[in-house]
Amino acid sequence: MLARIKKERILQAIRELDYVPNAVARGLRVRRSQTLSLVVADITNPFYPDIAKACEEAAQEAGYLVNIINTNEDGQRLADALRLLREGKTDGMIITTALEKDRTVLKELKDYALPVVFAHRELPGLDMDSVVSDNFNGAVAATNHLLGLGHRKVAFMGGVEGSEITRLRKEGYLFAMRQSGLAIESEWLISGEARYEPSYLATKTLMELDSSKRPTAILNINDVGAIGVIDAAYDLKLNVPDDLAVVGFDDLFIANSRLIQLTTVRIPRYELGKRATLILLEKLKTSAREVDVKPTNRIVLPVELIVRGDLRRKRA
């Protein structure tokens, strides 16, 4: 009777504390699954295949398989994915979808010293291993390119709220504009959500501004959104690039299409995935005690402005 009462109390405590058995922490008593998980924000976004390919190839060489988990920017889906790691159902995780709203659940990974590496996105102040691109300087280069063509009314079309990428690219744009002594209209800072349709609609909003404020160039946070800008411009009977110049980020394969020839900032997607996976594999060789004393890896990969087509010098 006493044993049954104790068992019920233990089970009740488990339910109340939302306790999850951490199979990773059990050490040698639990066999590894030989799988890694890659968490992505939107599996339909053509940005992610190169990262996934790099992860898979690096993992395969080490004898691991890679599962891809799609969150659709849903915090609950991310929490569910992280639960798999806490339960030991995957040996390690590469996360590409860290947002400010996810800070609490992601901090738990650090508190548990679980094997995780951020790729592409990171959260400032969390002090966890990450491999990212030089987003700030990429935006500076893209903005300066447009300014060098004579554009003085340049809009910045941002992405997902709470993303460090959005913040850094916006800061790079603002830095370049201020360095040139240009005023920045509040209407020029608009979100396209890093997606096609929202960017399309945001472009129409910008083009409805009074001629004194209407931008002659738009820097979109990614290529998918930049295509939305271009299509909106065509539907508005605007010539690209004579009436509206467009620059994107990522350098997806479609950017080099002969019909598009999009100037963009190249993000080293394959290298992001490869470097993150190699760091994760190294962490899996390290004991929890050694993890506590090892310095955090933060790798910032260089980016490159790829100039295509003929954006043309803006006529005064």
Image (tube, helix red, strand yellow):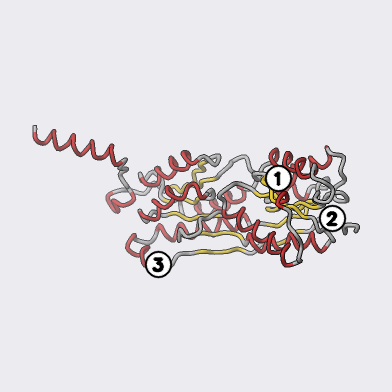
Question: Is 121 left or right of 152, judged from the image as shown?
Answer: left
Which is more N-terminal, label 2 or label 3? Answer: 3
Secondary element at tag 1: helix
- Please give the residue where the numbered disc 2 appears in the rendered image: 311
Q: CA distance from mark 3 to mark 1?
A: 39 Å
Q: Residue at x 76, y 62 (%)?
A: 182
Residue 65 appears in the rendering: no
Question: Where is residue 219 shown, x and y percent of the image?
Answer: 73, 53
Circles 2 and 1, Cβ within 8 Å, touching? The answer is no
Amino acid at dot 1: Gly
Q: CA distance from mark 2 to mark 1?
A: 18 Å
- Please give the residue where the numbered disc 1 appears in the rendered image: 225
Amino acid at dot 3: Lys
Question: Where is residue 32 shown, x and y percent of the image?
Answer: 36, 49
Q: Residue at x 20, y 39 (%)?
A: 10
**Numbered circle sitting on residue 294:** 3
Which is more N-terminal, label 1 or label 3? Answer: 1
Q: Residue lying at the far left in this picture: please name it.
A: 1
Residue 85 appears in the rendering: yes
Amino acid at dot 2: Leu
Closer-to-camera residue (273/106): 106
* Quadrant housing the C terminus: bottom right
